[in-house]
Amino acid sequence: MTRSLDLSTESNWQLMYSVSIPVTPIATIGSKTYYAQITPIRPGVILDKPILGITINTSVPTGKQWSYAGSLSRFTNSPLGEIYIDERKPLFLGRFNLAISDNLSNNYQLQINIPKWFISCNLGIYQYEGESRTIEQQELDVIKAAVIPG
């Protein structure tokens, strides 16, 4: 389905969650330092819109070129346990990652899986608050207005 969105208007985005996970050294053996692995991040935020923007950054070691920043999963709780709503979506470093899901019928939560090589992380999750209707919905509104004068 094609959507008509205004993604460039800042007021259409609401920051729902942000976190900065610092570097956590756990041991130094010889000249090598070992760091704690970042566990999957599960913000305690209930979301209800199908469009999200996710930013994720980390310190990239000198001489390395990283672009992959993990993955995003949406889930909801049911009497039978957690239900994952859609497939994992990849996230990329230094980008505003857009995640759209058309098959949402209820509120959901997120899980962000960070690559095991990250030693720190800055994460921001934004929910799109602007108008989000498909082209088909907009055309139906035009037809309704023509048929049923209001």
Image (tube, rainbow, N blue to C red):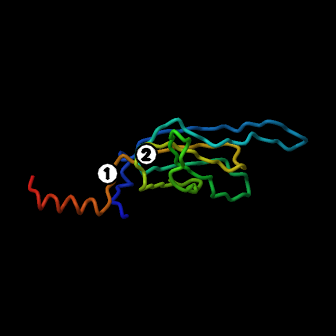
Nearer to us in this view, 14 or 99:
99
Amino acid type, mark 2: Gln
- The residue where tag 2 is placed is 127
Q: Determine the residue positioned at 83% across, 37% down.
A: 27
User: Residue 44, percent across and down?
Assistant: 53, 35
Nearer to us in this view, 117 or 32:
117
Q: Determine the residue positioned at 11% across, 61% down.
A: 147
Label 1 residue SS: loop
Q: Determine the residue positioned at 46% across, 38% down.
A: 46
Amino acid type, mark 1: Glu
Q: CA gap, disc 1 to disc 2?
A: 12 Å
- The residue where tag 1 is placed is 131
User: Residue 17, percent across and down?
Assistant: 50, 38
Residue 125 position (above or below residue 148): above
Q: Determine the residue positioned at 11% across, 57% down.
A: 148
Task: Look at the image and tell me in which quarter the N terminus lies.
Answer: bottom left
